[in-house]
Amino acid sequence: MGVFDIFKRVSYYSPMTQVVLVGLVCFLCPGMYNALNGMGGGGQVDRTTGNNANTALYSTFIVFGIAGGSIVNLCGVRWTIAISGLTYALYSGSYIYLNHTGSGSFTIAAGALLGIGAGIMWAAQGMIMVSYPREEEKGRYIAVFWIIFNLGGMLGGVLPFAINFHSDSNSLSDGVYIAFVILECLGAALGLALAPPSKVVRDDGTSVVMVKYTNAAKEAVEIVKLFLNPTMLALLPMCFTSNFFYSYQFGPVNASIFNIRTRGFNNIFYWGAQMAGAYALSFLLDNQNMTRRRRGLFAFGIVAVFFNVIWGGTLKQQLRYTHGPLPSGETTDYPGGLLDFMETKRASGPIILYMLYGLGDALYQNLAYWIIGSLTNDSQRLSRYSGFYKGIQSLGATVAWQLDAKNVSYLNQFIGNWVLLVISLFPMFYVVYNLTDHSEDPPLAVFEDVDKQSVASASYSVEKTV
């Protein structure tokens, strides 16, 4: 069965509908942020403010990513996602202020607030995506989400490409930022359309019930336990590395060797390749003719080989230049100057390489989510695992964005990315190799057969999320 076959006979309370809805929220909020961030420096010629804003963003993301799962467990998914979505709109709007004042303080503060919102939103998203489907469907559900989410980045790339098509400026106009703000506000409102987890029922009658046996003290203890969990510790390098490469790809590559309209053009294919990668990998990850370990090892092999190949191609490209356009007016030292997509002979190779970056990102992160989803079926635990993943991921991103902000040489940034990738592969292989065919938690009871009296006597109640 293909990815899109599971759309058949879905209802509002089905897991697929909920994954599509959260995908649409991320299409409009993180997807638009990715499109903006993919321009390099938030679409500004001077990347300093954008880099510092991203550093502030990921600094708060570290804390609220790790704590986000517990916040979602305590507060529910609807309002946490809706309120978090507004922080994306605030961040995009802050660039309008930057365009008119030249002061980056508001943008940096908005980045810090976005880190809080993003940490909570991604914890909620991860819980929905990997705990709602049945075990044999997790790869496809991850793919469906990833396709919808990255369609946002892809279409978001069309905006700056079209609006700046005839522009000679190296910065985005107000119109682009206003469009992003409007779309992100729509995404925040859409978060209110999500159903409470207590009402979501799988096609086989199995309920997706969040059982409320938690409180703030318990969640604080569970967060500490994450750092004592051997499996999560083994996945630390994977988490740390999974977004580390963004600052290098968006800044020293896209913003440094391409003109403004070609940066938007590149993002269309970067995020489009992510959709293709997620779709293709889902067939392997959910192939029931192989054991879970075998599927994981095949996927791991694809990721390991693919990433090392594209970093090899990047090394050849990086040795040709040392800097991009500078605030002083000096242009890039890339041979021949900034690339334009119309210069097919010069630009086709770097554009294809940049597109392959997006494909590699999808393969790596979809495998990472699949691994996390293979560890348990418990929705509360998965919300914490997802938060841990995004929190440590943000720690890596904080370091990476500061490397670019501090003008670390492009070559050294590239070497750091490649070394971290190789380091992450060894413990990642260990976790995949030790996967079992079924997660540690037994499936939840079939919804029709749940005895309400026995549930009440068990001293915990179904969570009433709003």
Image (cartoon, rainbow, N blue to C red):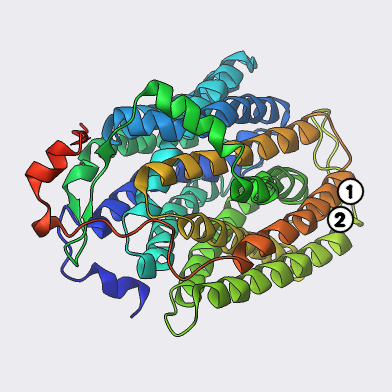
> Which label is found at residue 318?
2
36 or 220, which is in the foreground?
220
Kindly identify the residue that appears in the image at 33 percent across and 80 percent down.
Answer: 1
Q: Is residue 381 left or right of residue 312?
A: left
How packed mark 1 is, by other alpha carbons closer than 10 Å (few <14, some 14-19, many 20 or more), is some
Q: Which of the image's four quarters has the C terminus?
A: top left
- The answer to which of marks 1 and 2 sits earlier in the sequence is 2
On the image, the x and y values in percent for residue 199 come to: 16, 46
Three-letter amino acid code at disc 1?
Answer: Leu
Secondary element at image label 2: helix
On the image, the x and y values in percent for residue 235 come to: 64, 50
Kindly identify the residue that appears in the image at 43 percent across and 35 percent down.
Answer: 69
Q: Is residue 290 left or right of residue 465?
A: right
Q: Residue furthest bottom?
A: 289
Circles 1 and 2: CB atoms closer than 8 Å: yes
> Which label is found at residue 411?
1
88 or 134, which is in the foreground?
134
* 106 versus 288 height, above or below: above
140 or 135, which is in the foreground?
135
* 80 versus 130 height, above or below: above
Three-letter amino acid code at disc 2?
Answer: Gln
Q: Is residue 207 left or right of residue 441?
A: left
Secondary element at image label 1: helix
